[in-house]
């Protein structure tokens, strides 16, 4: 599937795709070890697909955290974020962790 198509999917859909790709990679590795793998290039393709899915999930997570805390897209440090929300650094980090 192309990256453009994957970007249109929601985070839960991407997580499901990632889970399925990971299971398929395990199956391919097992078949490789037993000598039953007919298309060894599929391992590399699947690893790249998994990396793409992880990247897209990280981007969606970053966008959701920024939207939740009204963080501008550039130059927002932990200090600025804590000051803007009138919280301590620790409270700000907890809120960011809860958003994930």
Image (tube, helix red, strand yellow):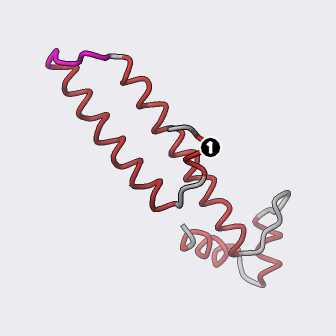
Residue 28: horizontal and vertical position, in percent? 26, 28
Task: State the image coordinates of residue 40 (x, y, percent, origin top left).
Answer: 32, 16
In this view, the residue in front, 80 or 7, is: 7
Instruction: Choose top left, top right, bottom left or bottom right for residue 88.
Output: bottom right
Q: Residue at x 38, y 17 (%)?
A: 41
Above or below for 24 versus 61: above
Q: Position of residue 76 (x, y in %)?
A: 82, 63
**As drawn, is 2 to the left or to the right of 43?**
right
Would residue 44 be found to the left or right of residue 84 on screen?
A: left
Q: Residue at x 64, y 74 (%)?
A: 90
Left or right placement of residue 77 versus residue 68 in this view? right
Q: Which residue is mark 1?
A: 4
Binning the other alpha carbons within 10 Å of mark 1 as few (below 14), some (14 to 19) or many (20 upward) gives: few
- For the point 58% across and 52% down, the residue is 58
- The C terminus lies in which quarter of the figure? bottom right
**Extent of the magenta region:** 34-39
- Return the residue nearer the eye: 14 or 59: 14
Give the residue displayed 64% in from the left and 67% down from the top.
64
Note whether 4 is above or below 80 in the view shown. Answer: above
Give how far across and how far down residue 54 sits, in percent.
51, 46
User: Is most of the magenta stretch helix, strand or loop?
Assistant: loop
Q: Quadrant of residue 74?
A: bottom right
Q: Residue furthest left?
A: 34
Residue 8 magenta-drawn? no
> As drawn, which residue projects farthest toward the bottom?
86
Rendered position, 30 above or below 50: above
Q: Does the magenta portion include 35?
A: yes
Total labels drawn: 1
Q: Is residue 79 left or right of residue 93?
A: right
Query: Helix, strand, or loop for circle 1?
Result: helix
């Amino acid at each position: 599937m192309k990256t453009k198509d994957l970007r249109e999917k929601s985070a839960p859909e991407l997580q499901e795709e990632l889970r399925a790709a990971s299971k398929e990679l395990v199956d391919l590795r097992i078949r490789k070890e037993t000598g039953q793998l007919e298309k060894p290039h599929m391992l590399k393709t699947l690893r790249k697909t998994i990396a793409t899915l992880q990247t897209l999930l990280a981007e969606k997570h970053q966008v959701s955290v920024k939207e939740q805390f009204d963080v501008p897209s550039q130059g927002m440090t932990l200090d600025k974020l804590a000051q803007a929300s009138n919280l301590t650094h620790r409270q700000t980090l907890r809120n960011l962790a809860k958003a994930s």
